[in-house]
């Protein structure tokens, strides 16, 4: 063989190696999530996809939700984000409008817009300006969790059915030491935390009082609506429980951990508590119940900012995650409620009665969601910062005039954000 023939062979071989290297690289996708409990689910989906794509490698990167939101905000504009990005639709909207998240493949769009798979609400939150951008996966939906042993000791036969009963029950359920200081909260309220979470939880209680944070107008714009009687009742309920009834304090253990350790008698949270409690506190005696008026629904979808083969793989993965077997596993083992409607969940619900509070509420139960507008996250985050300060302010307790002034000032800031975005409507 001549020198030139050998050289040509080496070049061809190098080209083949490069081609194979690129092909292997194209078969690797990264999934970004903000829910650590979903790591085994996402890995499970990746393993299942290997039946059709043996060379596929799925890397799962999960960090706490608020940190996940920050990394998406930094990485997506720089083109350095994961291939499959899990996000709440309200958060994703700003990236969709900025062109940073890409429309789905035709196959994924057909899957999402199949009425057998998803209801119109989910199809709507997945779309913008006639194009589908995300594949719905699961949703955050809330209910009341309550410790049945604590309720029985307090002489309470069942869960509270009105917001006034929440207050009355909390007074009966709180446990105090010899100095009268609460050691087990009667009702664990979200009183602190970063990001928009405090405002999200406030909106749930606000809804029970008949209010909302933002209200749509017929022209497609929005107005703030929490500087209202419903807003006053909601803030009053928080500050009175903290500073007058003293059934909870900002310093007390809170949320799921406190409930599992029997440091609170009741709290409002999403369905994922069920799966988490089965792992961390399997002997805990508790039940779940619908809220007085209705629940927030926070749809979580899978998106991508990638193009070409990466985008195709990303949406293949999103559809694989929606296989009925995978969704049933997610509900049973993690507790998140699937968005896909044509999945038989009855056997799981029969084994886990607490799920009935989420999937079998009263006939007149109402639902609401966070507005899918680009500035919603900023509005909620800024309101959350103000709420944390308000909850710590004892001067608001029993003082409706001071509460009204607080709400008016907070709403003015929200209106400014809407106005700057060209989204402020008229009342």
Image: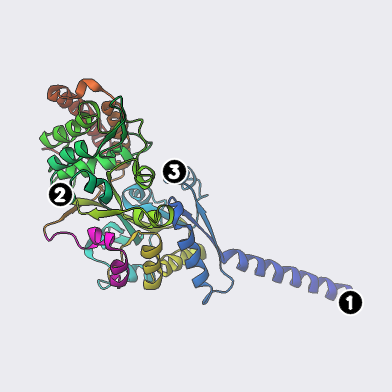
Percent x, y of residue 79:
50, 50
Residue 73 numbered tag: 3
What residue is pinned by disc 2? 292
Horizontally, residue 11 falls left or right of residue 286, namely: right
Q: What x and y, as percent, mark residue 385?
A: 32, 31
Q: Which SS class for mark 3?
A: helix
Q: Position of residue 81 (x, y in %)?
A: 50, 51
Residue occupying the point 74% across, 68% down: 14
SS at mark 2? loop
Q: Residue at x 39, y 72 (%)?
A: 325
Distance between the alpha carbons at the discs numbered 2 and 1:
86 Å
Q: Going by the image, does 81 lie left or right of 189?
A: right
Label 2, residues with CA under 10 Å away: few <14, some 14-19, many ≥20: many
Q: Which residues are magenta?
A: 344-363
Q: In 3D space, how far apart are the residues under numbered discs 2 and 3 (Cα atoms)? A: 36 Å
Q: Nearer the viewer, residue 58 or 272?
A: 272
Most distant residue in the top direction = 395
Q: Earlier in the sequence, mark 3 or mark 1?
A: 1
Please say if 385 is above or below 305. Answer: above
Q: Are marks 3 and 1 in contact (CB under 8 Å)?
A: no
Residue 216 is at least partly visible in this image: no
Which comes before the other along the chain, label 2 or label 1?
1
Q: Image check: 183 left or right of 12?
A: left
Label disc, if present, on residue 2 of the rendered structure: 1
């Amino acid at each position: 063989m001549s020198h030139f023939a050998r050289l040509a062979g080496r070049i061809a071989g190098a080209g083949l190696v490069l081609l194979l290297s690129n092909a292997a690289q194209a078969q690797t996708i990264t999934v970004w999530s903000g829910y650590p409990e979903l790591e085994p689910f996402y890995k499970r989906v990746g393993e299942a996809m290997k039946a059709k794509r043996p060379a596929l490698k799925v890397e799962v990167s999960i960090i706490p939700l608020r940190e996940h939101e920050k990394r998406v905000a930094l990485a997506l504009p720089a083109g350095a984000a994961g291939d499959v990005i899990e996000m709440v639709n309200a958060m994703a909207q700003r990236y969709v409008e900025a062109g940073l998240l890409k429309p789905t493949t035709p196959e994924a769009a057909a899957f999402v817009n199949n009425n057998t798979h998803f209801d119109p609400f989910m199809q709507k939150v997945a779309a913008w300006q006639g194009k589908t951008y995300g594949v719905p996966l699961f949703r955050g939906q809330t209910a009341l969790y309550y410790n049945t042993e604590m309720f029985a000791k307090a002489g309470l036969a069942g869960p509270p059915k009105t917001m006034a009963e929440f207050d009355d029950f909390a007074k009966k359920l709180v446990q105090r030491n010899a100095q009268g200081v609460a050691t087990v909260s009667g009702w664990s309220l979200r009183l602190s935390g970063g990001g928009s979470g405090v405002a999200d939880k406030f909106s749930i209680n606000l809804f029970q009082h008949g209010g909302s944070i933002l209200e749509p107008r017929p022209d497609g714009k929005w107005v703030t609506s929490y500087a209202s009687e419903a807003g006053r009742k909601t803030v009053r309920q928080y500050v009175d429980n903290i500073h007058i009834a003293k059934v909870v304090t900002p310093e007390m253990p809170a949320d799921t951990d406190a409930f599992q350790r029997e440091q609170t008698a009741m709290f409002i949270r999403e369905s994922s508590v069920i799966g988490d409690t089965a792992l961390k506190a399997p002997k805990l005696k508790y039940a779940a119940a619908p809220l007085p008026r209705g629940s927030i629904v926070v749809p979580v979808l899978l998106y991508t900012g990638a193009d070409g083969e990466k985008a195709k793989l990303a949406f293949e993965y999103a559809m694989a995650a929606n296989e009925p077997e995978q969704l049933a596993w997610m509900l049973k083992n993690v507790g998140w409620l699937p968005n896909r409607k044509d999945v038989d969940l009855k056997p799981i619900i029969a084994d886990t009665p607490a799920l009935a509070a989420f999937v079998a509420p009263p006939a007149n139960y109402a639902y609401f969601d966070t507005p899918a507008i680009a500035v919603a996250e900023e509005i909620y985050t800024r309101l959350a910062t103000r709420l944390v300060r308000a909850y710590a302010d004892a001067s608001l307790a029993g003082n409706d005039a001071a509460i009204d002034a607080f709400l008016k000032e907070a709403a003015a800031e929200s209106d400014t954000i809407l106005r700057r975005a060209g989204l402020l409507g008229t009342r």
